[in-house]
Structures are given as structure tokens and as C-alpha cells.
Amino acid sequence: MRPVTKFFIDAYCALSNEPEWHEEIMHVKLTLERPLSELTADIFFQQYAYVVLCSYWKEQYARREWEKFFDAGDLEVISNRRKRAAIANGINHAAEWLVELKRSDNPIEYLDTLPMIGEVTRCHLARNIGIDCVKPDRHLIRIAATFGYGHSDKVKEQYEIVTRMCKDIQTEIGGSEQLGVIDVVLWRWCNLGRF
């Protein structure tokens, strides 16, 4: 067994024993099992807004902003002007974007056309709406480098590196876990400061 697979298994077992993180893992599993054709405009918009808020912000802060926005139903509670404008745009266009997404031959690339969504955040949004993929964020890049998968400053290569790492883990555990679940477990473990 590769050391990175053992690392994943240890993180998965530990997080699964904590109710909040077990619930997060189960939510991701269920999301990835839902066909994209069943995705609603409301869920798409909620995830779009969440990913926009997460961009360059610590997840815990972004989640608080997201909850404030959806509780208040008021864009003015969002502290960042650019993020507020992107989310306002999403309010007006999420249903249209979803139609285009479902028609797209490459849904992940399509997401890159949305306001405030880039090469990394498109993978975050894709995973959150049910497309099984890996987000090449700083935590997964650091894990990949630590376990000998290499490092790159180019996002495309980072994506290939972290995807290869997660596919290796997936293969070694018998293909029983979606890439998005492996991603979330590794990311959450680092986000909690456990790596």
C-alpha cells in the first residue's frame, strides 16, 4: 500500500468518527451519485454562491458569509464587492447557466465561463454539483508533493498531479470511493490543521 493511501484511510476513518465531518462525507457521496440531469437551478445557484465566496477566503469564513446571505436574503451582507456582484449575476442567470451546463460537451470547462469561477474553482463547483473530479487546491497540491507526486506552478499540471494521486488512492482501495470524496477527505483533514 502506498503511504498516501494509508494517509487517506487514516484521515477517512478519523473524520468518519466525527459527526460533522461524517455528515459532510455522506453529503458529498450522495451529491456525486445524483445525475447532473437532476440538478435544480436552486441547488446550482446555492453551490455557485458558496464557491464564489470560498475563492481566496478560508472556508469557515466563507461558510458564515454564505449562511448570512441565505438567511437574510440580502446581497448587502456579503462583504466583498466583486463577490457580491458575481452572486447578483448568479441570481439573475443561474437557471440559464444550468441549461447551458447540461448541454455542454465539457461541463467542467463550461463552468470556467461563469463570473468569478476560474481553473481551480471550476473543479470545486463541479464537485459540489455532482461531477466527480478533484480540485487542485493548495492542500491537495501539498499532499501530492509530500508523497512524491511532484509539483507544478501551472494549474493544468496541478490538476493532473492531484487527479493522479486521487486515482491511485481510489485504485488501491478497490475503486469503492469517488474521486470527489477522496478530495474532500484529504482537503478537510488539511483544513482542520491535521497535516
Image (cartoon, helix red, strand yellow):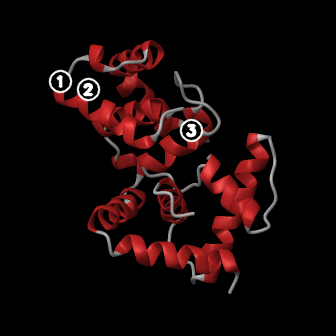
Q: Residue tagged by mark 3? A: 122
Q: Secondary structure at mark 1?
A: helix
Please rate how many residues cluster around mark 3, counting C-alpha atoms within 10 Å: few if below 14, some from 14 to 19, many from 20.
many
Q: Kindly identify which numbered label has been placed on residue 72.
A: 1
Residue found at the far bottom of this picture: 1
Up/down of 108 relative to 8, above or below? above
Please rate how many residues cluster around mark 1, counting C-alpha atoms within 10 Å: few if below 14, some from 14 to 19, many from 20.
few
Instruction: Tell me the mark number nearer the camera, choosing from 2 and 3.
Output: 2
Is residue 176 visible in the rendered structure shown here? no
Q: Position of residue 175 (x, y in %)?
A: 56, 78
Q: Position of residue 184 (x, y in %)?
A: 48, 58
The kind of residue tagged 1 is Ala
Measured in 3D between alpha carbons, the distance from the residue under mark 1 to the one under mark 3, in whole angstroms, is 27 Å
Measured in 3D between alpha carbons, the distance from the residue under mark 1 to the one under mark 2, in whole angstroms, is 5 Å
Where on the picture, by quarter, is residue 86?
Answer: top left
Q: Secondary structure at mark 3?
A: helix
1 and 3 marks in contact (CB < 8 Å): no
Q: Position of residue 149 (x, y in %)?
A: 78, 64
Q: Residue tagged by mark 2? A: 69
How many marks do you count on the picture?
3
User: Is residue 66 rendered to the left or right of residue 178?
Assistant: left
1 and 2 marks in contact (CB < 8 Å): yes
Q: Nearer the viewer, residue 95 or 192?
A: 192
